[in-house]
Image (cartoon, helix red, strand yellow):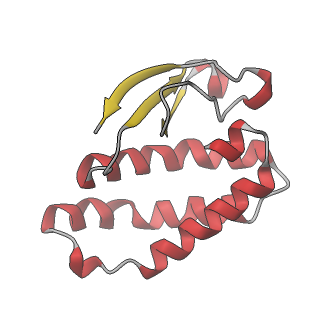
Amino acid sequence: KNALANDNGSEAAIGAKAMEAVISKLDKSLLTADQKKVYDEIEDDLRKHAEDIGKNGDNVSHEREQFSMMSEDVYDLVKAFGSGRTLYHDHCPMYNENKGAMWLSETKEVKNPYFGAKMPTCGTVEEMMK
């Protein structure tokens, strides 16, 4: 999120590759039955989005498209697993031809990953998660 908010596709690609590595090493035997069910439902999509972002460090627009879909999966994970810290569920109403998109943030201050420097504060906090 932070890399895309800063219009930095290379940094977003590095973060996505790190996420992909974590996904590959996750020991699912440590999950509860409910957590495993949620994780199994989104694992392939999450991996695909991370892989795609990781391969497109020179195309921020494409990374943002993948990030919008990945954000839905990550939100579901946080709901099932918890976050261990306060997170903010933010929403940008203008992204994707005004269809909108969400993301999770570690700060209450809105830093829009979909428009970066063009509209850095576009969006609202929709939910605080602990």
- Residue 105 placement, left or right of 6: left
Q: Is residue 34 above or below residue 89?
A: below
Q: Nearer the viewer, residue 129 or 62?
A: 129
Which residue shows up at 24% across the image and 52% down it?
A: 80
Q: Position of residue 69 (x, y in %)?
A: 53, 46
- Residue 60 placement, left or right of 18: right
Q: Position of residue 111 (x, y in %)?
A: 62, 29
Farthest residue to the left: give it.
33
Q: Is residue 8 above or below residue 100?
A: below
Farthest residue to the right: give it.
58
Q: Position of residue 14 (x, y in %)?
A: 70, 64
Point out the image quarter for the N terminus: top right
Q: Quadrant of residue 18?
A: bottom right
Q: Is residue 110 above or below residue 63?
A: above
Q: Is residue 36 above or below residue 114?
A: below
Which residue shows up at 74% across the image and 47% down it?
A: 62
Which residue shows up at 70% across the image and 42% down it?
A: 4
Q: Quadrant of residue 121?
A: top right
Q: Nearer the viewer, residue 108 or 24?
A: 108
Which residue shows up at 79% across the image and 40% down it?
A: 7
Q: Position of residue 112 (x, y in %)?
A: 63, 29
* Number of numbered labels in the structure image: 0
